[in-house]
Image (cartoon, rainbow, N blue to C red):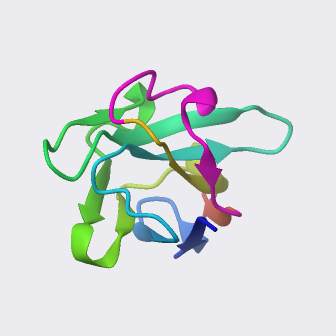
Amino acid sequence: QVQLVESGGGLVQAGDSLRLSCAASGRTFSDSAMAWFRQAPGKERDFVAASSSARDGYTSYTDSVKGRFTIARDNAKNTVYLQMNSLKPEDTAVYYCAGSDYYSGSYASTRFYQYWGQGTQVTVSS
């Protein structure tokens, strides 16, 4: 059984940094895409960042986080990270890790991913 377990969320002030982790088990994702999404109360789950695989280093970000967030992988640990810097109140949301059976596709679409974590809350105060 594939499991994705997020950690690292919390309450921070605007301008602070956080690093989210997502540890995968039951399947190796080194050759397939992983991503982070977020969902604020009353809103849809939105794309944040994606990594196509651990081999080619291709990454994609939503415009609002470019230059502030970085997605990275540790292949040996089967873990994906989201480094979040210069956090803003509008970054407040539950952050979800996602894994796909595929290497390329519509990275920003929730339908591209078959595996999801339970989410971790990030709250940024002004």
The extreme left residue here reads 56
- The range drawn in magenta is 103-118
The extreme right residue here reads 42
Is 60 or 84 nearer to us in this picture?
60
* Residue 50 falls left or right of residue 108: left
Residue in the picture at 56% in, 39% down = 113
Residue 124 at x, y = what percent? 60, 60
Q: Is residue 65 magenta?
A: no
Quarter occupied by the N terminus = bottom right
Residue in the picture at 86% in, 37% down = 42
Residue in the picture at 36% in, 34% down = 61
Quadrant in which residue 16 is drawn: bottom left
Quadrant in which residue 29 is drawn: bottom left
Say if 54 sits above or below 20 in the image. above
Residue 74 at x, y = what percent? 25, 69
Say if 75 sits above or below 70 in the image. below
Quarter occupied by the C terminus = bottom right
Residue in the picture at 40% in, 69% down = 19
